[in-house]
Amino acid sequence: MSISTTKLIITGLFLYSTTLFAQEVKGYERIYYTEPESINQNDIEYSFRNSVAQFDHCKTAFTITNNSNDFILYKSDESKFKYTFGEKYPTVKPFYVEPGKKKTKTLQVEGAEQYLQGAFEIELGGLYRIPMDGKTIAAPDFKLPAATNSMKMDCFKVTLKKYSASTKEAKAIFDVTYTGNDVGILHPANLSVTAQRKKSNEMVTYANDNKKSKPIIVHKGETVKITAVFHIPGKIVDMQFADMTILWNDTFVESKEIKLDAPLVKIAMDEALTKEKK
């Protein structure tokens, strides 16, 4: 390798490092940053925009677009904003992104340090994938009106909190507690009810008609509510007087948090925008 080639490489490395770890920028009250390219990681997309810094803090809008079939969990305290003066940790509460959804949160770091820097990095730790197809937990059928208000199985405890029935509608509200060591997923839309048709021995089955039913994540010791709503035509079953049975149909699933790789995001000063807004 020639001396001139070596000099070019050294010069390039120096310019790269000074750009990546730029020092404090003088003469501005705010620094605006360019929008980095989004990152795609197995059907999950991460993007940053509207990054801006003032003397005592820096913030950026962080979006997770979940195109996978699983839940995505983000724990911000495992991410790092990396500066020449050290590392800082954002303090957004952990949040989930459902399959096929996206969510945006503001990540902010603050303190006595000088955040008016020419560039910084974000090490995007704290990302977890929670597979929807975990271990299905079998649950016994549940009688309505209830003979007993609670039941236990493997890693879930279920308690009936409220039940009402009329000819047109029956509604049951349950508290569900996860007692396992991993993570529980509830699918209340899966459950159904069965009852005997009027003047017949035929059994009919109707699905949970609660329009707000969606998968729910629950961790050890946490309790959440699920609601089942049933509509059976009165000419078939009078729910006000009928004995009915809830069939859980894979409502209860135990899964795991699978930690994902932590992408490194480089964010540099947008000189033109910063000057424009000065």
Image (cartoon, helix red, strand yellow):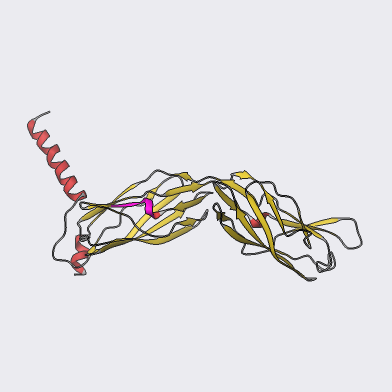
Indicate the position of residue 191 as horizontal and vertical percent values.
Answer: 70, 55
Of residues 74 and 68, the one nearer the viewer is 74
In the figure, is residue 179 to the left or right of 278? right
Residue 80 is one of the magenta-drawn residues? yes
Indicate the position of residue 117 as horizontal and vertical percent values.
Answer: 20, 58
Region of the chain picked out in magenta, as a range: 77-81
Of residues 155 and 60, the one nearer the viewer is 155
Q: Quadrant of residue 114?
A: bottom left
| Viewer can see residue 52 | no
Indicate the position of residue 94 as horizontal and vertical percent values.
Answer: 44, 57
- Residue at 84%, 55% in the rendered image: 203
Of residues 154 and 232, the one nearer the viewer is 154
In the figure, is residue 253 to the left or right of 148? left
In the figure, is residue 1 to the left or right of 188? left
Residue 275 is one of the magenta-drawn residues? no
* Picture quarter with the N terminus: top left
Indicate the position of residue 7 as horizontal and vertical percent values.
Answer: 9, 37
Q: In which quarter of the image is residue 205?
A: bottom right
- Residue at 42%, 51% in the rendered image: 45
* Name of the residue lying farthest toward the top: 1
* Picture quarter with the C terminus: bottom left
* Name of the residue lying farthest toward the right: 199
| Viewer can see residue 247 | yes
